[in-house]
Image (tube, grey):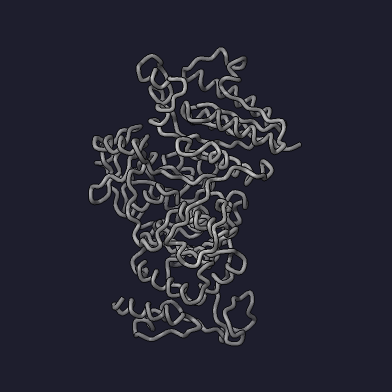
């Protein structure tokens, strides 16, 4: 018997839940998926819930009854499509626990758009006081924290939203693949596409973002203007540059499926188990610390303006939650040490203990710097689709690329259609080479030694944590959001000093099933030049003793560069070496 599933459409009234459920029902029947059962308010009120009103207790009971019926059907192989406002997170969580293969679809739309749409005139009646306890007006709607799919129904056509849901169900193996409604053909980014790009192919990026839908927290139009006015009267949270970058990563979907800074429940779940409360893999806490004075000005459940160092309002934090972290507990779990010699621990211990969580609404995106390589996940995914790449290997780097790195990139290109070089340009520890210098070395290498049509370079705007194995998973999931299908993991990825074993960052991937991560790790041993082999090799492919290897320690290499000496070409390309010599001697 085929396994059933439950697709649970939730959102404010008039957000398109039933319309989308009906479209999905029709498409499933067209593909031969029978039987399919759709449940919505009009259907269940006939018999199942006719005795219930609109109090919180009755609404919870309504969802309990519906999810009970849905679970029985799904356990007997029937796909069930539920379309209910279901405004309370706890009721939806209980439904998730009860139902097999539960897929939450958040039909998200701006309140202003829903009031304008309002087919039954209910919003206007609620605003006029003619209806009480109306969700979104005088009764709360608790947005999903980590839905499998987000459909922005005020900006997407029904076909575009349907395509998102179908792709997720296909990727989970819950329905057979078939010709489905796809997003409109992407417009190529003219800067990325400038280097000998192949013809456009009309399809989406081959891999879904983490969580099933790419998060976009930017607010536009009339809603943006209204929020700007609201922000003037809100208490402010001033973001230091580190957290301006975190804001940018949240707003543009780098951190999909996160929709804001974590509240206490998500924070503790991630620190303890590397999972969000719904079970989605997420290894690092994304939090916002504030000083005591700021915390005292905030109201739980209220909102705050997010302001940069120049006083510019970047966004609004909604549904504010205030809680206190235990730095030692967090450090022990995330970094596996409480030593202040670890740069990630040192930052953690120096920060305020008060944390503020909430949903982010982005009014303005801060400048991420490095405009020649700064693209959002959406822009990179569009370019991947334009180039027709089915498989993409991403490489995270915060160092110059030497011959050993070059070897890994070439190996990845042998098995993937394209390479995404993804240099980290956020905050790093003192002593790391500046991002501007590194970017010059990357361009020198790519322009001279790689096929232009098979490589993209797009900056990774996040900050470095030096969290070793956990950060390796984090880097992989973020690159999945950029459209990568594979992720290169080398020796001591994201490590520092001797806090982690040389291959722990590779081994941690084995703790998760492939479906949970949705991106394939490419694990490599260190590469080196062997005189006897006459080329770049690893211990897996070279039988010769260490005396045949041409290699330099990091310290020896830096000393050569300071003296203006060019390292051996078997270690570093001369074009790269010249840039590093200039930078090391203070000339670049």
Q: Is residue 110 above or below residue 42?
A: below
* Residue found at x 57% / y 19%: 42
Residue 411 percent location from the top left of the image? 59, 70
Question: Foreground residue, 434 or 82?
Answer: 82
Specify the quadrant of the image occupied by residue 562.
bottom left
Residue situated furthest top in the rendering: 51
Q: Classify residue 244 as left or right of residue 519.
A: left
Report the residue at 52% width, 84% height from top. Answer: 550
Position of 179 relative to 230 (above/below): below
Camera-nearest residue between 513 and 379: 379
Q: Quadrant of residue 507?
A: bottom right
Q: Quadrant of the C terminus?
A: bottom left
For the point 36% across and 71% down, the residue is 437
Q: Left or right of 261: which side holds 72? A: right
Residue 336: x %, y % from top left: 46, 56
Residue 176 occupies quadrant: top right
Q: Quadrant of the N terminus?
A: top right
Closer to the camera in the image, 174 or 124? 124
Determine whether 193 is above or below 288 in the image.
below
Q: Position of residue 322 (x, y in %)?
A: 35, 38
Q: Visible in this render: residue 329? A: no
Between 382 and 282, the one nearer to me in the picture: 382
């Amino acid at each position: 018997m085929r396994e059933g599933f439950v697709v649970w459409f939730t959102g404010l009234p008039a957000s398109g839940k039933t319309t989308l459920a009906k479209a999905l029902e029709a498409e499933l029947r067209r593909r031969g998926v029978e039987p399919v059962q759709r449940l919505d308010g009009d259907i269940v009120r006939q018999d199942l819930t006719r005795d219930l009103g609109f109090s919180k207790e009755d609404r919870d009971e309504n969802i309990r009854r519906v999810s009970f019926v849905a679970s029985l059907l799904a356990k007997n192989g029937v796909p069930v499509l539920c379309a209910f406002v279901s405004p309370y997170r706890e009721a939806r969580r209980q439904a998730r626990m009860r139902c097999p293969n539960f897929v939450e679809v958040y039909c998200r739309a701006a309140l202003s758009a829903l009031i304008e749409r309002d087919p039954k005139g209910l919003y206007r009646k609620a605003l006029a006081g003619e209806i009480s306890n109306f969700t979104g007006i005088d009764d709360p709607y608790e947005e999903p924290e980590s839905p499998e799919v987000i459909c922005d129904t005020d900006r997407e056509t029904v076909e575009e939203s349907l395509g998102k849901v179908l792709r997720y169900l296909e990727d989970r193996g819950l329905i057979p693949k078939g010709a489905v409604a796809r997003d409109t053909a992407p417009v190529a980014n003219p800067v990325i596409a400038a280097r000998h790009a192949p013809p456009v192919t009309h399809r989406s990026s081959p891999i879904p973002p983490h969580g099933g839908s790419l998060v976009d927290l930017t607010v536009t139009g009339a809603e943006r203007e209204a929020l700007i006015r609201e922000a003037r009267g809100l208490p402010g949270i001033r973001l230091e540059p580190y957290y301006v970058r975190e804001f940018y990563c949240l707003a543009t979907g780098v951190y999909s499926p996160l929709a804001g800074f974590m509240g206490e429940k998500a924070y503790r779940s991630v620190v303890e188990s590397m999972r969000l409360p719904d079970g989605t893999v997420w290894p690092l806490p994304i939090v916002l610390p504030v000083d005591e004075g700021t915390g005292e000005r905030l109201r739980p459940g209220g909102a705050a303006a997010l302001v940069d160092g120049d006083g510019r309002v970047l966004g609004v934090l909604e549904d504010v939650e205030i809680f206190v972290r235990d730095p030692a507990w967090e450090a022990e779990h995330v970094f596996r040490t409480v030593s202040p010699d670890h740069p990630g621990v040192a930052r953690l211990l120096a920060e305020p203990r008060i944390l503020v969580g909430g949903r982010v609404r982005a009014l303005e995106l801060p400048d991420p710097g490095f405009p020649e390589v700064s693209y959002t996940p959406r822009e990179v995914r569009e370019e991947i689709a334009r180039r027709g790449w089915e498989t993409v290997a991403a490489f995270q780097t915060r160092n110059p690329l030497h011959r050993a790195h070059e070897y890994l990139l070439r190996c990845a290109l042998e098995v993937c259609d394209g390479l995404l070089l993804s240099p980290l340009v956020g905050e790093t520890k003192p002593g790391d080479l500046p991002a501007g210098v590194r970017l010059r070395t990357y361009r020198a290498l790519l322009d001279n030694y790689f096929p232009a049509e098979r490589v993209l370079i797009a900056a990774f705007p996040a900050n470095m944590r030096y969290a070793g194995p956990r950060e390796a998973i984090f880097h992989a999931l973020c690159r999945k959001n950029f459209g990568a299908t594979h992720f290169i993991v080398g020796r001591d990825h994201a490590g520092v000093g001797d806090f982690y074993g040389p291959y722990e960052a590779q081994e941690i991937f084995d703790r998760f099933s492939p479906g949970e991560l949705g991106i394939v790790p490419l694990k490599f041993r260190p590469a080196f030049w062997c005189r006897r082999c006459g080329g770049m090799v690893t211990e897996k492919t070279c039988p010769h003793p260490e005396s045949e290897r041409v290699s330099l320690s990091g310290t020896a290499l830096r000393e050569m560069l300071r003296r203006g000496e060019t390292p051996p070409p078997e270690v570093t390309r001369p074009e790269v070496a010249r840039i590093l010599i200039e930078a090391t001697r203070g000339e670049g």
